Image (cartoon, helix red, strand yellow):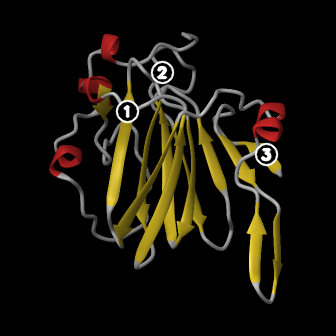
Amino acid sequence: MKVTPLEIPELLLIEPRVFGDQRGYFSETWSEAKFTAAGIGAPFVQDNVSLSARGTLRGLHLQNPHGQGKLVMALTGAVFDVAVDVRVGSPTFGRWVGRELNEENHLQLYIPPGFAHGFVVLSETAHFAYKCTDSYHPEAECSVRYDDPDVGISWPPGSFTLSPKDEAAPFLREIPRERLPQYGAR
C-alpha cells in the first residue's frame, strides 16, 4: 500500500496493492496494522455504502461535534471526491482537494475530522463505501453549499442532482464559527 499526503497534508491518498489475473482481482482495503503504521490510527466504528446515479452530488457534509474521519472509495463506477478544510484557524481553511476515485484505479482517500466531504458520480452508477471514525449523529450534522464561490470547487462539467437539504446548505461564510470544528482541537 502506498500512502501519499495531498495538497492539504492531512488528506491522504491511498493506493492499495491490487493482485489481478484472468479471474479478476484481490485487494486489501483495510488493515489496522498497516493503516496505523501510515498514521491513520483512529478506530473505525461504522461502515456505509451508497448507490447513486450519474450526476448525483452528495455533500458537502461534516459533523461537529462528533467529527468523523472517513476512509472512502468507489467500489463500482467512478466519482469525483472532494474534501474541504473547515477547521477554524487552520492555515488551509476553506481550501479543497479533489480526486477521481473509481473501480479501476482502486484509490482510497482518508479525510480526517474537520473536513467537509462530498462527491459527484461520473459513471452511470457508483457504489461508494465509507469507513467512519464516529457514528452518525443527526444533531451534529452540518453542510456547506457545494457551489460556494469562496471555496471555488472545480466540479466536473454537467448537471447535478442534489437532495433538498444539500441544495439549501449555507455558504461557508454564513456558518457561525462556533458551529465549525477548531484547528488543533481533539
Residue for badge 1: 136
Q: CA distance from mark 2 to mark 1?
A: 19 Å
Q: Quadrant of residue 52?
A: bottom left
Q: Position of residue 147 (x, y in %)?
A: 31, 48
Please say if 164 is above or below 125.
Answer: above
Mark 1 residue crowding within 10 angstroms, few (<14) / some (14–19) / many (20+): some
Q: Position of residue 74 (x, y in %)?
A: 55, 62
Please say if 29 is above or below 24.
Answer: above
Residue 155 visible? The answer is no
Report the front residue among 179 and 27.
27
Q: Which mark is residue 3?
A: 3
Q: Quadrant of residue 119?
A: bottom left
Identify the residue at image location x=34%, y=52%. 58
Identify the residue at image location x=48%, y=30%. 68
Q: Which mark is residue 32?
A: none
Mark 2 residue crowding within 10 angstroms, few (<14) / some (14–19) / many (20+): many
Q: Which mark is residue 87?
A: 2
Label 3 is placed on what type of residue? Val
